[in-house]
Image (spheres, helix red, strand yellow):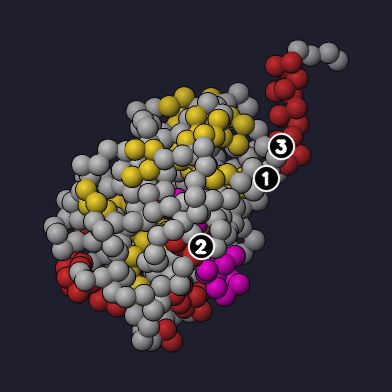
Amino acid sequence: MRCGAALCGLLLFALSAEAQGPPPAGHGPYFPADAPWYQDISAAPLDAESSLVINWLNGVGWGGGQMQIDFSIEVLQADAGTHLCPFTPTDDFFNPDCDHVPIPVPVGGALEGESGYECTGDGDCHLLVVSPSTHKLYEMWRANITDLSTCQFQGGCLAVWDTSLTYPPIARGQGCTSADGAGFPMAPLLFSADEVAAGHIDHAIRFILPNSRIRQHVYVHPATHTTNPTSGPPSAPPYGTRLRLRADYPLASLPNEGARVVARAMQKYGILLADGGTIALTAQNDTFTTAKWSGLLGSHDLAALHVSDFQMVAAGDRYSIAVDCVRTTPLFYDGLELGSLAKWSGAVP
């Protein structure tokens, strides 16, 4: 049977979809070892505002009233043969913050909170795909793919990260957002069932707070951005704040070893304030991982951790929302990567 180029492409795509099955889960490390989220901050000095911030935040608490875990965000892995899909930007795509290039979308994957690639629930619908063969991490907010075979794909802000680089403190650009409000990548901060089952998490952990509990219009590195909805007072933590679980916290009091694994990571690497929302901690969904969350860790297994059990690590200079996004390189647009970056040279923390 003969077919035209377009039809043959669709037939090959359909055949590969049947042959591939579900994609593997993405897993770290995603960046070089000197990236900020891999740094041991267990002995780092406290921020001058640590007591102020902790006391204020302890008075209002975590979102939802206690520390809970969200297990809804997928991280997918593409290979060199994964189908590339261009997308049509929506009103959630911002210039010059966001990148506009085709994304490798593995067959059989899913968005955050969805069973497939269609954003049916009107949530954040993050699409996170790591491509080890090209050293790229693609992270999109508000993705919606109604037909993968023909790339019927609309998307919000896409941040493309070069995983061979350790970015400087201004990351993709001072004042620039990413798929998360704070402007840094998401995948390196998500802990997975595979990591917890292995007994160690070797990176900082993403956490979020309601906008009213984030300092209004202020951020600190490694964040490069804050958002208009933030409305917290000067005693609230700014975007990019890193909290550390106290070294003397009684880990044995936690309900299971899974919770203790997460708590030990909080003591060594801390938690980084990345976005606005209600459920404090974010784990990677287990649909595509080898280990599963059932019997390993539950959504309320860290509820005993109160704000007063944490300290604020020294955060450095404060930056204002008044700074418009000024993109550094690399800038990904129309399939091109422009320029290169020097290695991270900032002090830790």
Could you tell me residue 320's position as x and y percent?
22, 48
Q: What stretch is highlighted in magenta?
A: 184-202
What kind of residue is marked 2?
Answer: Asp
Q: Which residue is drawn at 52% across and 69% down?
A: 201
Of callouts 3 and 1, which one flags the residue occurring earlier in the amino acid sequence? Answer: 3
Of callouts 2 and 1, which one flags the residue occurring earlier in the amino acid sequence? Answer: 2
Tell me, for residue 36, which label it has, or none.
none
Secondary structure at numbered mark 1 = loop
Give the mark count.
3
Pair 3/1: label in front: 1
Quadrant of the drawing holding the N terminus: top right
Query: Is the residue marked by circle 1 packed among few (<14), some (14-19), or many (20+) residues within 10 Å?
Result: few
CB under 8 Å between callouts 2 and 3? no
Q: In this view, does 29 lie above or below 58?
A: above
* Res 286 seen here: no
Residue sitting at the far right? 1
Of callouts 2 and 3, which one flags the residue occurring earlier in the amino acid sequence? Answer: 2
Could you tell me residue 67's position as x and y percent?
33, 67
- Label 2 belongs to which residue? 34
* Res 7 seen here: yes
- Label 1 belongs to which residue? 133
Residue sitting at the far left? 233
Q: How far apart are marks 3 and 1 (CA)?
A: 10 Å
Q: Residue at x 31, y 47 (%)?
A: 225
What kind of residue is marked 3?
Answer: Gly
